Image (cartoon, rainbow, N blue to C red):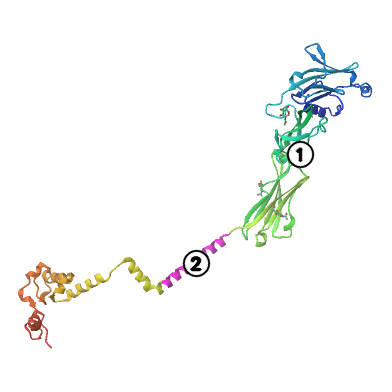
Amino acid sequence: MPLRVLVILLLVFMQQCTPDSCVYRDHITVLEGEPYHLKCCLPYDHHHHHRNSSIRWTKRYGSNRTMTLHSNGRIIFNDDAIEFWPIEMIDKGIYSCAVGNKESHWNITVTKRSEHGCFHPKYLITKEVEVGKSLIINCTHDLYQTEAYEISLFKDCSPIPGNHKANIRKNAVLNDAGNYTCIFFLYKNKRSFNVTKTFNVKIKDNTDTMPTLYGNSINYVEAELGKEKTLNCTALLRDPTAIIYWNDEHDNDTNIHKEKFNRSGSNGELYVSSLLKINFVKEENLNVWYNCTLASPGILETIGFFLKKKEGPTDVSRHIFIIVLVSSAAVIFLVIMCVIYRVDIMLCYRDLIRRDETLTAIFDDIHSLIKKSRRLIIVLSENYMADKVSYELESGLHEALVERKIKIILIEFTPINDFTFLPQSLELLKSHRILKWKADKSLPYNSRFWKNLRYLMPAKTAK
Ligand SMILES: *[C@@H]1O[C@H](CO)[C@@H](O)[C@H](O)[C@H]1NC(C)=O
Ligand SMILES: *[C@@H]1O[C@H](CO)[C@@H](O)[C@H](O)[C@H]1NC(C)=O
Ligand SMILES: *[C@@H]1O[C@H](CO)[C@@H](O)[C@H](O)[C@H]1NC(C)=O
């Protein structure tokens, strides 16, 4: 019978069975491959007188065949016990030990461990621990504790990270639930054996039965200056002795008062709310903690509210004011710069758009002068011909020939052979309106040239 089962039985029959006594249960299940130790139940006086010489171990096969057992290396007799190193599947059956006329029987079943597990799911010692209470697992064994050369503690068949000891002592959390296996490593006849003992640990989540405060333990709350602010501390109480209260730092502030409300839930639970009201939030109410505590036997829970200043509308308008101020300063600065550097800016602007005002200005002047004129004097010269600018000429000719307001006088300053550059209309000009400049001959004021010119010009009293 595997020792883990023995241990279970020992725990169950703690009262009747000490390590030194026998197993009274007649059905025993043991794990294949583990050493197993079965003690004979002896009459009281036997311990002190005739020892194992008179103990007879038999095994029953079928309905009535029995066989006396002998030590064979794997099965040995040790004092008043029979030991298996280890027990195997073939060992299942009904065993008896007889001392005098007293006989005890056990029906031993041998089972395999679960395929990949280090324990059998049916042979577990159950431990139930509440969250927060202490979870203690000690790997102790009544028979093999001192004999073991090594003892290990595994959780769900794997080593426990950070725990190299064969025991655990901690405050239970939900994650602690699982199967904890103590493995006792033994040597016998130069062979290595191990015996296991597995605890099935269940963690009871008792949080739903305990009083609790609502909300986060730390709360950052915005409050507006001058406005009212209410902080709500609510607890779910199942324990009538539990109380909630605001910590007393703000008790002397007449600006603060507290109110309590109770409400019963549908399942008989009690909700208690304690409100802390600040009538007008002032600067000194900001950036400080308002802590609310729940106290009940074994529980002291606090949640804190930290008041932060809320950016009110006054601050928004201040921001707008600053923006307006900065932008008007920028505008004024720009205007001043434009006035100081207006010449440079204008020149730069002209360079950029490449405007040439000289081109039209002149044309308009010529046009208006031509309109005011009564004669158009055209002086033909080589230079004039080289100048391709013929706008004045064309415009004057238009006035003279089309509108017939101006009379033309053509002066040939230097002899000209090629007249093709002149508008064709000029060829219609009457010959007396063409004057030839004859160098020195025409120079004196009373010369033919000047007389002809005066003749062609409008009449005017001579000085
Ligand atoms: C314990 O012994 C069994 C059977 O001999 C073996 O299968 C298992 O691997 C051993 N466990 C360890 C942790 O050595
Ligand atoms: C306070 O909070 C609790 C839980 O959220 C809520 O039920 C209750 O109505 C609140 N009380 C007030 C006065 O706001
Ligand atoms: C209030 O709670 C905050 C946050 O938990 C903590 O830092 C502070 O010390 C507490 N104040 C008091 C007086 O308990």
The residue nearer to you, when weighing 24 against 323, is 24
The residue nearer to you, when weighing 73 against 249, is 73
Q: Residue furthest front?
A: 190
Mark 1 / mark 2, whichever is N-terminal: 1
Residue at image coords 5%, 74%: 431
Circle 1: residue type: Lys
Q: Say which mark, if any, is on residue 241.
A: none
- Residue named by callout 1: 165
Left-right relation of 415 to 161 = left
Residue range (magenta)? 312-337
- Residue 130 in the image: above or below residue 277: above
Principal secondary structure, stretch drawn in magenta: helix
Q: Quadrant of the N terminus?
A: top right
The residue nearer to you, when weighing 79 against 187, is 187
Q: Residue furthest left?
A: 431
Residue count near mark 2 (Cα–Cα under 10 Å), binned few <14, some 14–19, many ≥20: few
Residue 453, image x and y in percent?
9, 80
Q: Quadrant of the C terminus?
A: bottom left
- Residue 245 in the image: above or below residue 76: below
The quarter of the picture where residue 188 lies is top right
- Residue named by callout 2: 326
Residue at image coords 76%, 26%: 34
Circle 2: residue type: Val
